[in-house]
Image (cartoon, rainbow, N blue to C red):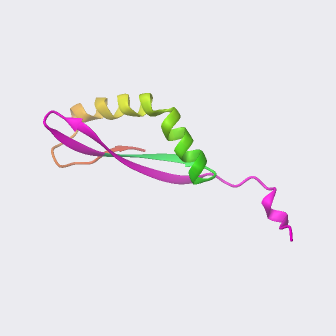
């Protein structure tokens, strides 16, 4: 049986991805929020935009306080 709501585009949902970035001899926790209609699209956007995300995280790393998470929201 077919549901009528399957053809309607879904509203974007915020997906949060967590990763770590090297900070000298240690690592810093980072997170980025991506708005997409589903997890697979959000994951694709995260991977396609990784160079930009990494650059933003490294730039924010300079200003981050020890123990603080880097948020790219």
* Residue positioned most to the front: 1
* Image-based side of 55 in relation to 24, left or right: right
* Image-based side of 6 in relation to 33, left or right: right
Count every numbered label the image shows and give the total: 0
- Residue 27 located within the stretch drawn in magenta: yes
Q: Residue at x 70, y 55 (%)?
A: 10
Image coordinates for residue 20, horizontal then vertical, percent: 29, 44
* Image-based side of 63 in relation to 46, left or right: left
* Residue positioned most to the bottom: 1
Viewport quadrant of the N terminus = bottom right
Image coordinates for residue 37, horizontal then vertical, percent: 64, 51
Viewport quadrant of the C terminus = top left
Q: Residue at x 56, y 41 (%)?
A: 44
Image coordinates for residue 35, horizontal then vertical, percent: 56, 47
What range of the chain is rendered magenta? 1-29
Q: Residue at x 42, y 28 (%)?
A: 51
Q: Quadrant of residue 26?
A: top left
Q: Residue at x 41, y 34 (%)?
A: 53
């Amino acid at each position: 049986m077919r549901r009528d709501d399957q053809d309607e585009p879904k509203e974007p949902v915020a997906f949060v991805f967590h990763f770590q970035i090297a900070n000298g001899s240690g690592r810093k926790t980072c997170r980025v929020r991506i708005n997409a209609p589903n997890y697979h699209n959000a994951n694709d956007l995260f991977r396609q935009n990784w160079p930009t995300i990494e650059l933003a995280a490294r730039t924010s790393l300079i200003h981050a306080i020890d123990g603080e998470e880097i948020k790219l929201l």
